[in-house]
Image (cartoon, rainbow, N blue to C red):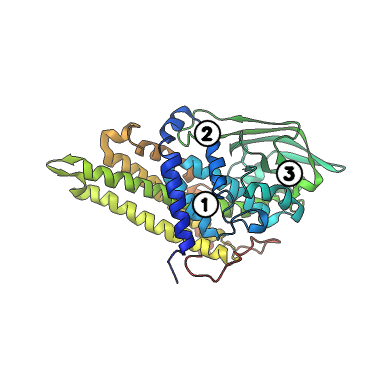
Protein backbone atom coordinates (compact mmCIF):
# COMPACT_ATOMS: atom_id res chain seq x y z
CA UNK A 1 0.00 0.00 0.00
CA UNK A 2 1.22 3.46 -0.91
CA UNK A 3 -0.03 6.22 1.38
CA UNK A 4 1.76 9.04 -0.45
CA UNK A 5 -0.21 11.66 -2.31
CA UNK A 6 0.74 12.36 -5.89
CA UNK A 7 2.33 15.74 -6.75
CA UNK A 8 -0.96 16.69 -8.42
CA UNK A 9 -2.91 15.88 -5.27
CA UNK A 10 -0.47 17.85 -3.11
CA UNK A 11 -0.80 20.80 -5.48
CA UNK A 12 -4.58 20.51 -5.32
CA UNK A 13 -4.54 20.54 -1.52
CA UNK A 14 -2.34 23.61 -1.46
CA UNK A 15 -4.60 25.38 -3.97
CA UNK A 16 -7.74 24.70 -1.96
CA UNK A 17 -6.05 25.59 1.33
CA UNK A 18 -4.96 28.96 -0.05
CA UNK A 19 -8.46 29.51 -1.40
CA UNK A 20 -9.96 28.82 2.03
CA UNK A 21 -7.48 31.12 3.78
CA UNK A 22 -8.18 33.91 1.28
CA UNK A 23 -11.84 33.53 0.31
CA UNK A 24 -13.61 31.91 3.27
CA UNK A 25 -11.93 32.34 6.65
CA UNK A 26 -11.84 36.18 6.58
CA UNK A 27 -15.60 36.36 5.89
CA UNK A 28 -17.19 33.28 7.43
CA UNK A 29 -17.91 34.84 10.83
CA UNK A 30 -20.03 37.52 9.17
CA UNK A 31 -21.77 35.04 6.85
CA UNK A 32 -22.56 32.80 9.80
CA UNK A 33 -23.98 35.67 11.87
CA UNK A 34 -26.16 36.83 8.98
CA UNK A 35 -27.23 33.35 7.94
CA UNK A 36 -25.97 34.27 4.50
CA UNK A 37 -24.81 31.98 1.71
CA UNK A 38 -22.45 33.73 -0.69
CA UNK A 39 -22.98 32.19 -4.13
CA UNK A 40 -19.87 34.00 -5.36
CA UNK A 41 -17.82 31.39 -3.51
CA UNK A 42 -19.14 28.76 -5.91
CA UNK A 43 -18.28 30.96 -8.87
CA UNK A 44 -14.71 31.32 -7.62
CA UNK A 45 -14.48 27.56 -7.00
CA UNK A 46 -15.65 27.05 -10.59
CA UNK A 47 -12.90 29.35 -11.83
CA UNK A 48 -10.44 26.92 -10.23
CA UNK A 49 -12.24 23.94 -11.84
CA UNK A 50 -13.13 22.59 -8.40
CA UNK A 51 -16.86 22.04 -8.95
CA UNK A 52 -16.15 18.95 -11.05
CA UNK A 53 -12.74 17.90 -9.81
CA UNK A 54 -13.36 14.15 -10.25
CA UNK A 55 -15.67 14.34 -13.25
CA UNK A 56 -14.01 13.08 -16.48
CA UNK A 57 -12.64 15.77 -18.77
CA UNK A 58 -14.99 14.71 -21.56
CA UNK A 59 -17.88 15.84 -19.35
CA UNK A 60 -16.32 19.17 -18.39
CA UNK A 61 -14.45 18.14 -15.22
CA UNK A 62 -10.80 18.03 -14.20
CA UNK A 63 -10.56 14.26 -14.56
CA UNK A 64 -8.82 13.78 -11.21
CA UNK A 65 -9.45 10.77 -8.97
CA UNK A 66 -12.09 10.36 -6.28
CA UNK A 67 -9.61 11.01 -3.48
CA UNK A 68 -9.02 14.41 -5.03
CA UNK A 69 -12.68 15.14 -4.30
CA UNK A 70 -12.01 14.09 -0.70
CA UNK A 71 -9.06 16.49 -0.54
CA UNK A 72 -11.24 19.35 -1.77
CA UNK A 73 -13.96 18.59 0.79
CA UNK A 74 -11.50 18.20 3.65
CA UNK A 75 -9.85 21.53 2.97
CA UNK A 76 -13.13 23.37 2.37
CA UNK A 77 -14.57 22.23 5.70
CA UNK A 78 -11.46 23.50 7.40
CA UNK A 79 -12.94 26.86 6.40
CA UNK A 80 -16.59 26.08 7.06
CA UNK A 81 -19.03 23.19 6.83
CA UNK A 82 -21.46 25.22 4.70
CA UNK A 83 -19.04 25.57 1.81
CA UNK A 84 -18.07 21.90 1.90
CA UNK A 85 -21.74 20.96 2.01
CA UNK A 86 -22.38 22.89 -1.19
CA UNK A 87 -19.66 20.96 -3.02
CA UNK A 88 -20.75 17.66 -1.45
CA UNK A 89 -24.29 18.11 -2.70
CA UNK A 90 -23.36 19.51 -6.12
CA UNK A 91 -20.59 17.06 -6.94
CA UNK A 92 -21.07 14.07 -4.63
CA UNK A 93 -24.85 13.68 -4.55
CA UNK A 94 -25.82 15.13 -7.92
CA UNK A 95 -23.02 15.13 -10.50
CA UNK A 96 -21.60 11.72 -9.61
CA UNK A 97 -25.12 10.31 -9.71
CA UNK A 98 -25.57 11.68 -13.22
CA UNK A 99 -22.20 10.20 -14.14
CA UNK A 100 -23.30 6.79 -12.87
CA UNK A 101 -26.94 6.63 -13.93
CA UNK A 102 -27.50 9.28 -16.58
CA UNK A 103 -27.96 8.73 -20.30
CA UNK A 104 -25.45 10.34 -22.64
CA UNK A 105 -28.03 13.01 -23.49
CA UNK A 106 -28.60 13.75 -19.79
CA UNK A 107 -24.88 13.98 -19.17
CA UNK A 108 -24.40 16.44 -22.01
CA UNK A 109 -27.35 18.57 -20.94
CA UNK A 110 -26.86 18.58 -17.17
CA UNK A 111 -23.53 17.06 -16.11
CA UNK A 112 -21.28 19.09 -18.41
CA UNK A 113 -22.46 22.55 -17.25
CA UNK A 114 -22.43 21.35 -13.63
CA UNK A 115 -18.87 20.05 -13.86
CA UNK A 116 -17.83 23.42 -15.26
CA UNK A 117 -19.66 25.20 -12.46
CA UNK A 118 -21.94 26.99 -14.91
CA UNK A 119 -24.96 25.34 -13.29
CA UNK A 120 -25.46 24.08 -9.73
CA UNK A 121 -26.96 20.71 -8.88
CA UNK A 122 -28.73 19.48 -5.73
CA UNK A 123 -30.41 16.36 -4.33
CA UNK A 124 -33.96 16.07 -2.98
CA UNK A 125 -34.89 12.94 -1.05
CA UNK A 126 -35.89 13.90 2.52
CA UNK A 127 -39.49 14.85 3.31
CA UNK A 128 -41.25 16.08 6.47
CA UNK A 129 -42.23 12.49 7.37
CA UNK A 130 -39.47 10.60 5.57
CA UNK A 131 -35.86 10.75 6.66
CA UNK A 132 -34.14 7.47 7.45
CA UNK A 133 -37.33 5.70 6.30
CA UNK A 134 -37.01 6.50 2.59
CA UNK A 135 -40.01 4.35 1.65
CA UNK A 136 -42.23 6.78 3.60
CA UNK A 137 -41.89 9.56 1.02
CA UNK A 138 -45.19 10.97 -0.25
CA UNK A 139 -44.10 12.81 -3.42
CA UNK A 140 -45.65 11.29 -6.53
CA UNK A 141 -44.94 11.33 -10.26
CA UNK A 142 -47.72 10.30 -12.63
CA UNK A 143 -46.94 9.53 -16.27
CA UNK A 144 -49.09 11.46 -18.74
CA UNK A 145 -48.00 11.02 -22.33
CA UNK A 146 -44.54 12.45 -22.90
CA UNK A 147 -44.14 13.80 -19.38
CA UNK A 148 -44.63 13.09 -15.65
CA UNK A 149 -46.67 15.28 -13.30
CA UNK A 150 -44.83 15.75 -10.02
CA UNK A 151 -46.58 16.66 -6.75
CA UNK A 152 -45.19 16.79 -3.24
CA UNK A 153 -42.73 18.42 -0.89
CA UNK A 154 -39.11 17.97 0.15
CA UNK A 155 -37.35 19.40 3.20
CA UNK A 156 -33.85 19.94 4.56
CA UNK A 157 -32.59 20.30 1.00
CA UNK A 158 -29.19 21.96 0.67
CA UNK A 159 -28.89 24.66 -2.01
CA UNK A 160 -32.70 24.84 -2.14
CA UNK A 161 -32.70 28.46 -3.35
CA UNK A 162 -29.39 28.24 -5.24
CA UNK A 163 -29.38 25.09 -7.36
CA UNK A 164 -30.46 25.08 -11.00
CA UNK A 165 -31.04 21.30 -11.22
CA UNK A 166 -32.37 18.83 -8.65
CA UNK A 167 -32.44 15.04 -8.56
CA UNK A 168 -35.87 14.41 -7.08
CA UNK A 169 -37.27 11.11 -5.84
CA UNK A 170 -40.97 10.30 -6.13
CA UNK A 171 -43.34 7.34 -6.25
CA UNK A 172 -44.41 6.20 -9.69
CA UNK A 173 -46.07 3.11 -8.16
CA UNK A 174 -46.87 3.22 -4.43
CA UNK A 175 -48.08 -0.37 -4.48
CA UNK A 176 -44.51 -1.59 -4.95
CA UNK A 177 -43.24 0.29 -1.86
CA UNK A 178 -39.55 1.23 -2.24
CA UNK A 179 -39.42 -0.60 -5.57
CA UNK A 180 -41.93 1.89 -6.89
CA UNK A 181 -39.73 4.96 -6.33
CA UNK A 182 -38.23 6.67 -9.38
CA UNK A 183 -35.72 9.50 -9.85
CA UNK A 184 -36.12 12.62 -11.96
CA UNK A 185 -34.00 15.58 -13.05
CA UNK A 186 -36.02 18.70 -12.25
CA UNK A 187 -35.08 22.20 -13.33
CA UNK A 188 -35.83 25.20 -11.12
CA UNK A 189 -37.52 26.93 -14.06
CA UNK A 190 -40.20 24.23 -14.47
CA UNK A 191 -43.63 25.80 -13.76
CA UNK A 192 -45.05 24.75 -10.40
CA UNK A 193 -41.65 24.51 -8.70
CA UNK A 194 -40.90 26.70 -5.68
CA UNK A 195 -38.48 26.76 -2.74
CA UNK A 196 -38.24 28.29 0.71
CA UNK A 197 -35.24 28.45 3.04
CA UNK A 198 -35.28 27.24 6.65
CA UNK A 199 -34.23 29.77 9.29
CA UNK A 200 -33.16 29.32 12.90
CA UNK A 201 -30.71 26.45 12.38
CA UNK A 202 -28.31 25.47 15.15
CA UNK A 203 -25.35 25.33 12.78
CA UNK A 204 -24.24 25.57 9.15
CA UNK A 205 -25.92 28.96 9.21
CA UNK A 206 -23.86 30.17 6.26
CA UNK A 207 -25.45 27.45 4.14
CA UNK A 208 -28.68 27.55 2.17
CA UNK A 209 -31.07 24.84 3.38
CA UNK A 210 -34.80 24.58 2.96
CA UNK A 211 -37.92 23.16 1.40
CA UNK A 212 -38.98 22.38 -2.17
CA UNK A 213 -42.57 22.33 -3.39
CA UNK A 214 -43.92 20.62 -6.51
CA UNK A 215 -47.37 21.70 -7.63
CA UNK A 216 -48.29 19.78 -10.80
CA UNK A 217 -44.75 20.17 -12.13
CA UNK A 218 -44.48 18.76 -15.66
CA UNK A 219 -41.21 16.85 -16.02
CA UNK A 220 -40.28 15.61 -19.51
CA UNK A 221 -40.14 11.83 -19.77
CA UNK A 222 -36.52 12.07 -20.94
CA UNK A 223 -35.71 13.51 -17.49
CA UNK A 224 -36.40 10.18 -15.82
CA UNK A 225 -33.05 9.15 -14.34
CA UNK A 226 -32.48 5.44 -14.72
CA UNK A 227 -35.59 3.31 -15.14
CA UNK A 228 -38.94 3.48 -13.38
CA UNK A 229 -38.64 1.78 -10.00
CA UNK A 230 -34.85 2.27 -9.75
CA UNK A 231 -35.14 5.39 -7.61
CA UNK A 232 -34.34 3.70 -4.32
CA UNK A 233 -31.17 2.13 -5.73
CA UNK A 234 -30.18 5.44 -7.29
CA UNK A 235 -30.80 7.27 -4.00
CA UNK A 236 -28.68 4.82 -2.03
CA UNK A 237 -25.80 4.84 -4.53
CA UNK A 238 -25.89 8.64 -4.47
CA UNK A 239 -25.61 8.54 -0.69
CA UNK A 240 -22.50 6.37 -1.02
CA UNK A 241 -20.83 9.31 -2.74
CA UNK A 242 -22.36 11.91 -0.47
CA UNK A 243 -21.26 10.08 2.68
CA UNK A 244 -17.75 9.85 1.27
CA UNK A 245 -17.58 13.64 0.95
CA UNK A 246 -19.18 14.21 4.36
CA UNK A 247 -16.57 11.97 6.00
CA UNK A 248 -13.78 13.82 4.22
CA UNK A 249 -15.24 17.11 5.40
CA UNK A 250 -15.37 15.82 8.98
CA UNK A 251 -11.62 15.24 8.82
CA UNK A 252 -11.27 18.86 7.76
CA UNK A 253 -13.29 20.00 10.74
CA UNK A 254 -11.06 18.01 13.08
CA UNK A 255 -8.06 19.68 11.44
CA UNK A 256 -9.63 23.09 12.03
CA UNK A 257 -10.27 22.24 15.69
CA UNK A 258 -6.71 21.02 16.11
CA UNK A 259 -5.19 24.11 14.51
CA UNK A 260 -7.31 26.47 16.62
CA UNK A 261 -6.52 24.60 19.85
CA UNK A 262 -2.78 24.30 19.23
CA UNK A 263 -2.63 28.05 18.64
CA UNK A 264 -4.65 28.81 21.75
CA UNK A 265 -2.70 26.33 23.90
CA UNK A 266 0.54 28.11 23.05
CA UNK A 267 -0.91 31.56 23.79
CA UNK A 268 -2.99 30.98 26.92
CA UNK A 269 -1.25 30.48 30.28
CA UNK A 270 -2.64 29.22 33.59
CA UNK A 271 -0.84 28.39 36.80
CA UNK A 272 2.35 29.82 35.36
CA UNK A 273 2.58 27.77 32.14
CA UNK A 274 1.02 27.35 28.72
CA UNK A 275 -2.21 25.39 29.00
CA UNK A 276 -0.82 22.97 26.44
CA UNK A 277 1.50 21.78 29.22
CA UNK A 278 -1.44 20.51 31.27
CA UNK A 279 -1.90 16.78 30.79
CA UNK A 280 -5.70 16.76 30.54
CA UNK A 281 -5.51 19.38 27.80
CA UNK A 282 -2.88 17.23 26.09
CA UNK A 283 -5.29 14.31 26.31
CA UNK A 284 -7.92 16.23 24.35
CA UNK A 285 -5.35 17.29 21.76
CA UNK A 286 -4.18 13.69 21.45
CA UNK A 287 -7.75 12.50 20.85
CA UNK A 288 -8.14 15.08 18.10
CA UNK A 289 -4.95 13.92 16.43
CA UNK A 290 -6.01 10.28 16.65
CA UNK A 291 -9.44 11.10 15.27
CA UNK A 292 -7.93 13.01 12.38
CA UNK A 293 -5.58 10.21 11.36
CA UNK A 294 -8.20 7.46 11.74
CA UNK A 295 -10.76 9.44 9.77
CA UNK A 296 -8.35 10.16 6.95
CA UNK A 297 -7.37 6.52 6.66
CA UNK A 298 -11.01 5.44 6.43
CA UNK A 299 -11.84 8.14 3.88
CA UNK A 300 -8.87 7.66 1.59
CA UNK A 301 -9.24 3.87 1.67
CA UNK A 302 -12.82 4.29 0.47
CA UNK A 303 -11.60 6.67 -2.24
CA UNK A 304 -8.99 4.16 -3.34
CA UNK A 305 -11.69 1.50 -3.74
CA UNK A 306 -13.86 3.95 -5.68
CA UNK A 307 -10.95 4.56 -8.03
CA UNK A 308 -10.89 0.83 -8.74
CA UNK A 309 -14.60 0.83 -9.55
CA UNK A 310 -15.55 -1.09 -6.41
CA UNK A 311 -18.84 -0.53 -4.58
CA UNK A 312 -18.09 1.15 -1.25
CA UNK A 313 -21.39 1.19 0.63
CA UNK A 314 -19.90 -0.56 3.66
CA UNK A 315 -16.66 1.46 3.65
CA UNK A 316 -18.24 4.92 3.30
CA UNK A 317 -20.82 4.10 5.97
CA UNK A 318 -18.03 3.34 8.43
CA UNK A 319 -16.01 6.39 7.39
CA UNK A 320 -18.99 8.72 7.69
CA UNK A 321 -20.04 7.37 11.09
CA UNK A 322 -16.59 7.40 12.67
CA UNK A 323 -15.30 10.65 11.14
CA UNK A 324 -18.43 12.61 12.04
CA UNK A 325 -18.39 11.31 15.60
CA UNK A 326 -14.72 12.23 15.95
CA UNK A 327 -15.43 15.70 14.54
CA UNK A 328 -18.30 16.27 16.96
CA UNK A 329 -16.09 15.23 19.89
CA UNK A 330 -13.16 17.31 18.63
CA UNK A 331 -15.36 20.40 18.43
CA UNK A 332 -16.74 19.79 21.91
CA UNK A 333 -13.22 19.43 23.30
CA UNK A 334 -12.11 22.53 21.38
CA UNK A 335 -14.71 24.61 23.20
CA UNK A 336 -13.62 23.07 26.51
CA UNK A 337 -9.98 23.91 25.85
CA UNK A 338 -10.90 27.51 25.08
CA UNK A 339 -12.92 27.70 28.30
CA UNK A 340 -15.24 30.70 28.55
CA UNK A 341 -13.77 32.12 25.34
CA UNK A 342 -14.95 29.00 23.52
CA UNK A 343 -18.52 29.94 24.36
CA UNK A 344 -18.44 33.15 22.32
CA UNK A 345 -17.83 33.74 18.63
CA UNK A 346 -14.65 35.70 19.23
CA UNK A 347 -13.03 32.34 18.49
CA UNK A 348 -14.23 29.96 15.76
CA UNK A 349 -14.61 26.88 17.94
CA UNK A 350 -18.20 27.60 18.98
CA UNK A 351 -19.11 27.60 15.27
CA UNK A 352 -17.24 24.33 14.83
CA UNK A 353 -19.32 22.77 17.60
CA UNK A 354 -22.61 24.01 16.14
CA UNK A 355 -21.63 22.85 12.66
CA UNK A 356 -20.44 19.44 13.82
CA UNK A 357 -23.87 18.24 14.92
CA UNK A 358 -25.71 18.17 11.59
CA UNK A 359 -23.34 15.68 9.87
CA UNK A 360 -23.97 13.23 12.70
CA UNK A 361 -27.62 13.30 11.58
CA UNK A 362 -27.83 13.79 7.83
CA UNK A 363 -27.04 11.18 5.17
CA UNK A 364 -27.66 8.46 7.71
CA UNK A 365 -27.70 9.06 11.45
CA UNK A 366 -24.97 7.51 13.60
CA UNK A 367 -27.62 5.04 14.75
CA UNK A 368 -28.38 3.95 11.17
CA UNK A 369 -24.68 3.49 10.41
CA UNK A 370 -24.19 1.55 13.64
CA UNK A 371 -26.88 -0.90 12.52
CA UNK A 372 -25.44 -1.11 9.00
CA UNK A 373 -21.99 -2.03 10.30
CA UNK A 374 -23.40 -4.63 12.68
CA UNK A 375 -25.44 -6.23 9.90
CA UNK A 376 -22.42 -6.37 7.61
CA UNK A 377 -20.33 -7.96 10.38
CA UNK A 378 -23.05 -10.48 11.21
CA UNK A 379 -23.54 -11.40 7.57
CA UNK A 380 -27.16 -10.19 7.51
CA UNK A 381 -26.43 -7.54 4.88
CA UNK A 382 -24.78 -8.10 1.51
CA UNK A 383 -24.61 -5.58 -1.33
CA UNK A 384 -26.13 -6.76 -4.58
CA UNK A 385 -24.75 -5.72 -7.97
CA UNK A 386 -26.25 -2.57 -9.46
CA UNK A 387 -27.35 -2.23 -13.07
CA UNK A 388 -25.01 0.74 -13.41
CA UNK A 389 -21.86 1.37 -11.38
CA UNK A 390 -19.80 4.46 -10.72
CA UNK A 391 -17.04 4.42 -13.35
CA UNK A 392 -13.54 3.63 -12.07
CA UNK A 393 -11.04 6.45 -12.32
CA UNK A 394 -9.45 6.40 -15.75
CA UNK A 395 -5.99 6.86 -14.24
CA UNK A 396 -6.20 3.86 -11.88
CA UNK A 397 -2.76 2.32 -11.52
CA UNK A 398 -0.92 5.58 -10.97
CA UNK A 399 1.15 6.16 -7.83
CA UNK A 400 -0.07 7.57 -4.55
CA UNK A 401 -3.41 7.37 -2.77
CA UNK A 402 -5.07 7.44 -6.16
CA distance separating discs 2 and 1: 20 Å
Identified at 49% across, 49% down, the residue is: 367
* 178 or 261: nearer the viewer: 261
Q: Nearer the viewer, mark 3 or mark 2?
A: 2
Identified at 28% across, 49% down, the residue is: 284
> First in sequence: mark 2 or mark 1?
2
Residue pushed farthest front? 47
> First in sequence: mark 3 or mark 1?
3
Residue 216 falls in image quadrant:
top right
Q: Say what secondary structure mark 3 lies in.
A: strand
| Residue 171: image tag | 3
Where is residue 259 shown, x and y percent of the image? 33, 47
User: Left or right: where does residue 289 sit relative to residue 297?
Assistant: left
Tell me the quadrant of the picture where the N terminus can be found: bottom left
| Residue 37: image tag | 2
Residue 233 visible in the snapshot = no
Q: Say what secondary structure mark 1 lies in.
A: helix
**Crowding at mark 1 (Cα within 10 Å: few <14, some 14-19, many 20+):** many
Amino acid sequence: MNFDFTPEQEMLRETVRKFVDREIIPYIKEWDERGQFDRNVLKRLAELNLMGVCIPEKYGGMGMDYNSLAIVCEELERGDTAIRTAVSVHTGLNSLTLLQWGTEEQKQKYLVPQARGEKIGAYALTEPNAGSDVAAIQTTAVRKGDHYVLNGQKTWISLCDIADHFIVFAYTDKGKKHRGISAFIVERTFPGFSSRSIKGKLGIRAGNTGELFFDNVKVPAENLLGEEGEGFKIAMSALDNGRFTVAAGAAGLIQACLEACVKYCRERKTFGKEIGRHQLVQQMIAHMEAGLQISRLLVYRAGYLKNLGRRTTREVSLAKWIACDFANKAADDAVQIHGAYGYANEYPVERYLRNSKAPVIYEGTREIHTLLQAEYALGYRKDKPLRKTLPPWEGTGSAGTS
